[in-house]
Amino acid sequence: MNIKTAKLSDTIALYTDLRLIIIFFMGFVSGLPFLLTASTLSIWLTESGISLTEIGLFTLVGTPYNLKFLWAPFIDRVPVPLLQRALGRRRAWMLVIQILLMVSIIGLGSTDPSRTPFLTAIFSILVAFFSASQDIVIDAYRIDILEEDEQGAGAAMTQIGYRFGLLASGAGALYLASYLSWKVVYTIMALLIIIGVIAAIKAPVPETDRNTLKSQSRGADWLRSTLIEPFVEFFKRNNLSTSIIILSFILLYKFGDAFAGVMANPFYIKIGFTKAQIATVSKIFGITATLSGVFLGGILVKKIGILKSLFICGLLQMFSNLMFSLQAKIGPDVRFLFLTIGVENLSGGMGSAAFVAYLSILCNTAYTGTQYALFTSFMAFGRTWLSASSGWIAQQTDWVIFFIISTFLAIPGLIILLLMMRFIPMSIQKGANISDQGGIL
């Protein structure tokens, strides 16, 4: 067997490993709820007569994604009574959260945004809360179950599954909404979470779960290891100034992309595209472009390293926003929409692959769930609170100017990345691969 054949067989063996297949399905149910409180919801709100300013403010229902690091320590360390012994810590939490997530999605679909927008917001927050909680345990499971040299493949499978989840709650929901009520659509989306329930039951138990079952600290030691050490370890490892720079980068890297994304679906509707056109181009074709970007991003990381890949992908993400300005000039031309979505999703997929790989290596595996939640919370803060004004800005300007503004908002993150590349070696940023539950205080 020659070297190329050996490498191909090794790759096939890796991606057909049960753990990677399980991670794919977990990625699917992780991505599924997100659009139900984001772009799919924004189309429902637009059709219900909600103003752009109010739609922008609805972005704030995603606040649980910003704050999930607050309860991540409990999901990371607290056992689920009875279920933990049968399923292990991670899988027990997955099962409980997924059941609650299904109930909250059905509740959201039962509301009427035009009559009871406050109730719609409440259920949206509940969906976001359980979705963010599910992300905590799924991300932690992925990092725990894989070896260090398998994390790249794990990140790729997570992204691929996540994108198919977005496809289901994006294009799938829009197609269904063309023929069915939103209540029925959201009920169908809720039932798809059963895929995650099956994945949780079939998933192998990480060795870290077995270690936790053998020895669980109590009292003050438990509080210290659960609530304090995950955060102290990160800041101690990097020192305060470096930690602030890293967190600022995480906050701002995808800010320009997120700011434009909040208004993307209202933009499509306002300039004259139909739901079917949006589903076909933005969702179905878009997922193909995104998956291509994910694979290209993974290759780029392997070839030139994470930080250089983040910079190149960041530039591509930034300039892709200008395609929307051109689309606004041209109008509801479906052929040009294919080009706009192709460029935006390809660059976004590349950036996501590099970004997930970067966040994963920042984690100390003794505190995976909590630290990864901390990092993704900062990322989500840019997508929600910092982007909440996007609707108001879109209403005060025109679409061309709005998307130009979103392009400039990507610059601060790239400047911070350049500083990191110049002054902070990757060897300092990396988290330790600690498999035990030992403390650092």
Image (tube, rainbow, N blue to C red):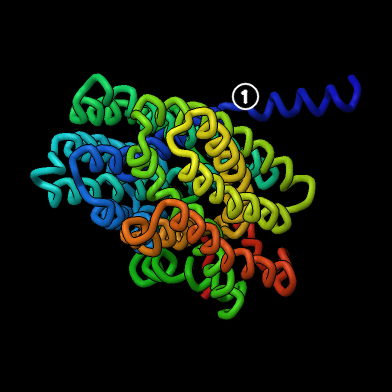
The quadrant of the picture occupied by the N terminus is: top right
Q: Is 93 on the left-hand or right-hand side of 360?
A: left
Residue 217 visible somewhere in the drawing: no
Above or below, 429 against 72 in this view is: below
Residue at screen point 41% across, 45% down: 264
Above or below, 239 against 179 in this view is: below
Q: Secondary structure at mark 1?
A: loop
Where is residue 33 shown, x and y percent of the image? 34, 39
Residue at screen point 34% across, 29% down: 275
Where is residue 109 shown, x and y percent of the image? 19, 35
Where is residue 398 shown, x and y percent of the image? 39, 55
Where is residue 349 shown, x and y percent of the image? 58, 42
- Crowd rating for badge 1 (residues with CA inside 10 Å; few <14, some 14–19, many 20+): few
Q: Nearer the viewer, residue 103 or 418?
A: 418
Residue 278 visible somewhere in the drawing: yes
Q: Is 250 on the left-hand or right-hand side of 65?
A: right
Q: Is 38 on the left-hand or right-hand side of 157?
A: left
Residue at screen point 73% across, 45% down: 300
Q: Which residue is mark 1?
A: 16
Residue at screen point 49% across, 64% down: 251
Q: Quadrant of residue 40?
A: top left
The amino acid at mark 1 is Thr
Above or below, 92 against 311 in this view is: above
Q: Nearer the viewer, residue 296 or 81?
A: 296
